[in-house]
């Protein structure tokens, strides 16, 4: 397959942001025989960034390849790349869960940087795939650690590592642990144990319980940037009847706002399937699910122009392993689009990123609400189009 034909679109594109790398090629080479031997429907691909693994396998003859990608942008990039290469009929995207993995005998996996994400994925594969399933998981050496072997070992009995090639390596996991395959029974078989994921944690100081799947930013913790923004939440457009938690993660901001303002309705949006699932659980466990609507979406694509008086945002500044301000600019533009005239974007950001000029240009007049040693909270007002 011509990997140079792959594109990241609709994800962020730019210098240093590639649609495939040497780890994708190594995974495919290490799994080539197993791919050729797999019957239709026996191959599953997880966390393929933009389709290199799924389409690479399809180009080797695999059919009915089931795929799960956490970001909705990755899912759409796969669809676009598949159409471009004439392989649309060979792959299909599915939600993460038992249905994705039923009958799978080979799983190709890009190793996530999060050990928690790896733990949850390995647990799901071991519990729901075929008993002879093999995981072929790879990544760049700079993002791998011996702890990955240990994490895979919680769910699989045999872990083998390939030789390194082009600064990449593959781990092969096989032999799902019987305790996971026997209805989540514990090691003794005498009692039933709950799955390790999702996890939950009570934060008494915030009056909040957080539920998170593996790999969601900050997990069940509340990161210090979000905590700083929460400290100013009461000041944020206090008469707003509705609001948006953009890039919501585990739903902490949306849930806390709904708890603090009993009459408000909140839309929480994130491109990550794991984040959206976590946000729904966080809202539910705190009793505000009926007022917090959670959407898996690229930015605020599901909301109309000039429809919301308040948007809250703690923007990520990584796209995959690369630092990029492009994703923040995209989110600022989405906020500007949906804000009503006079509506405000309340944003917390690492002070060294100096987002204020960008916020001024994309959204509108911006004032500083708070600043500490690491973070800045700003409010950017969307001007009436007639004023602009």
Image (spheres, rainbow, N blue to C red):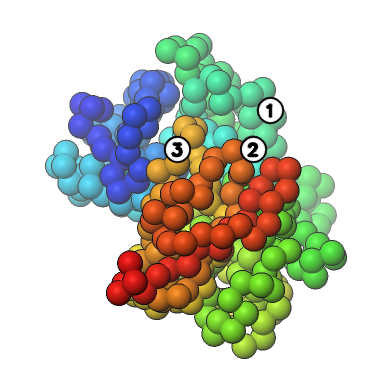
- Image point 33% across, 67% down: which residue? 388
- Relative to the observer, which residue lies in front, 225 or 259? 225
Q: In this view, does 344 lie to the left or right of 211?
A: left
Q: Mark 2 points at which residue?
A: 115
The disc, 2 or 3, on the residue closer to the chain's N-terminal end is 2
Comparing labels 2 and 3, the label whose residue is closer to the camera: 3
Secondary structure at numbered mark 2: helix
Q: Is residue 317 left or right of residue 18?
A: right
Q: In this view, does 293 lie above or below 222?
A: below
Comparing labels 1 and 3, the label whose residue is closer to the camera: 3
Crowd around label 2: few <14 · some 14–19 · many ≥20 (10 Å): some
The disc, 2 or 1, on the residue closer to the chain's N-terminal end is 2
Q: Mark 3 points at which residue?
A: 324
Q: In this view, does 345 lie above or below 75?
A: below
Q: Position of residue 99 (x, y in %)?
A: 46, 58
Secondary structure at numbered mark 1: helix
Q: In this view, does 265 lie above or below 367?
A: below
């Amino acid at each position: 397959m011509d990997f140079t034909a792959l594109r990241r679109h609709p994800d962020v594109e730019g210098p240093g942001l590639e649609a495939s790398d040497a780890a994708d090629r190594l995974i495919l080479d290490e799994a080539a025989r197993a791919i050729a031997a797999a019957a239709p429907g026996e191959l599953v691909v997880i966390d393929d960034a933009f389709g290199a693994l799924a389409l690479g396998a399809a180009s080797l003859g695999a059919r009915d390849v089931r795929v799960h990608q956490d970001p909705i942008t990755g899912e759409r990039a796969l669809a676009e790349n598949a159409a471009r290469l004439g392989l649309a009929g060979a792959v299909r995207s599915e939600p993460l869960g038992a249905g994705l993995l039923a009958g799978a005998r080979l799983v190709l996996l890009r190793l996530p940087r999060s050990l928690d994400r790896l733990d949850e994925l390995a647990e799901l594969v071991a519990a729901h795939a075929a008993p002879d399933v093999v995981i072929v998981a790879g990544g760049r050496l700079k993002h791998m650690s011996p702890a990955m072997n240990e994490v895979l070992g919680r769910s699989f009995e045999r872990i083998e590592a390939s030789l390194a090639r082009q600064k990449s390596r593959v781990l092969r996991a096989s032999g799902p642990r019987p305790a996971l395959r026997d209805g989540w029974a514990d090691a003794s078989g005498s009692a039933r144990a709950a799955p390790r994921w999702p996890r939950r944690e009570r934060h008494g100081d915030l009056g909040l319980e957080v539920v998170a799947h593996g790999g969601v930013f900050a997990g069940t913790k509340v990161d210090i940037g979000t905590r700083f923004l929460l400290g100013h939440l009461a000041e944020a457009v206090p008469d707003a009847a509705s609001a948006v938690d953009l890039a919501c993660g585990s739903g902490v901001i949306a849930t806390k706002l709904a708890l603090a303002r009993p009459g408000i309705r909140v839309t929480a949006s994130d491109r990550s399937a794991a984040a959206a699932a976590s946000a729904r659980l966080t809202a539910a466990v705190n009793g505000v699910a009926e007022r917090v609507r959670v959407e898996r979406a690229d930015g605020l694509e599901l909301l109309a122009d000039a429809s919301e008086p308040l948007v809250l945002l703690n923007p990520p500044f990584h796209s995959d392993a690369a630092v990029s301000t492009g994703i923040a600019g995209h989110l600022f533009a989405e906020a500007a689009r949906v804000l009503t005239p006079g509506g405000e974007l309340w944003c917390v950001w690492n002070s060294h990123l100096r987002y204020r000029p960008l916020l001024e240009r994309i959204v509108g007049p911006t004032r500083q609400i708070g600043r500490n040693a690491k973070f800045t909270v700003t409010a950017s007002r969307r001007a009436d189009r007639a004023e602009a």
